[in-house]
Amino acid sequence: MVSKYDFWVLDLDGTLVDVQPDYVSGVFEEVGNRLDYRFTERQTKTIWHGLGGSRNERLAEWGVDVERFWETFHDVEDPQARAERTYLYDDADFVAELDTPVGLVTHCQQYLTDPVLDRLDIRDWFDTVVCCTEDIGWKPDPAPVEKAMGEMGVAHDGSGTADPRRAGVLAGDGPHDIGAAWNAGLDGIHVERHSPDRRGQCVLGDHRVESFSELREDPVDGD
């Protein structure tokens, strides 16, 4: 499996790292206090992990002002506190073993991503780090993935499009990751950190694994 690909793109939150539940619940409690809305434990997990589809659609269904929620959420988040409560998944060191160009494409914003990479000492795992923004685009838009490919020097003729001579793959824990992979012309590996019952849907990819350790073994059948 590993030797099949000439370069890798990885998602960060929920794929390589996660955050201790007490930090997450504390953030949503404070956001709820400011919005005069009480988020249940289930709602908190749904929004934090992006379960059940679009976060904005879920918020709107609950009667929460989407724009105000995100403004408040970003105001409440403390980069250092979040970094201190962020941990690596046990299988994440798989990335450090890759002997190919490796890029990181995350929805986590730069001011939150940098402290996590530095505290966990994993910045040198990646040849480039792309944090999605309104200007760059959000997965499943291929633009941030294409930006990463361009910065890694694996895109076609200096453009952002996939080079047919190179086999690339994107691994992530959400459907937007697989969508971004396919839209950018890459294979997609879905890392199943949450069961389909909990997620509310089954995410299909070219491969689906419960742990990166499976990639060190026999090839995984496509889904």
Image (cartoon, rainbow, N blue to C red):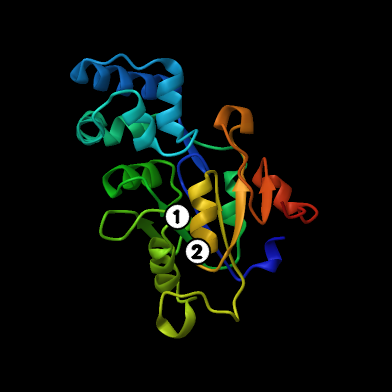
**Side (left or right) of 13 relative to 23:** right
Viewer-side residue, 137 vs 56: 56
Q: Is 124 rendered above or below residue 46?
A: below
Write down the quadrant of residue 137 in the picture: bottom left
**Side (left or right) of 68 relative to 210:** left
**Kind of element beneath mark 2:** helix
- Residue 219 percent across, percent down from the top left: 77, 56
Which residue was labeled with disc 2?
Answer: 183
Write down the quadrant of residue 185 in the picture: bottom right
Q: Residue at x 70, y 66 (%)?
A: 3
Is there a contact, CB below 8 Å, between mark 1 and mark 2? yes
Q: Residue at x 30, y 47 (%)?
A: 109
Classed neighbour count for the residue bearing mark 2: other residues with Cα under 10 Å, few (<14), some (14–19), many (≥20):
some
- Residue 181 percent across, percent down from the top left: 53, 60
- Going by the numbered disc 2, the residue's amino acid type is Asn
Image quarter hosting the N terminus: bottom right
Is residue 50 visible in the rendered structure shown here? yes
Viewer-side residue, 108 vs 164: 164
Q: Is 65 rendered above or below residue 96?
A: above
- Going by the numbered disc 1, the residue's amino acid type is Pro
Q: CA distance from mark 1 to mark 2?
A: 7 Å
Q: Which mark is residue 140?
A: 1
Q: Which mark is residue 50?
A: none
Question: Which comes sooner in the sequence, label 1 or label 2?
Answer: 1
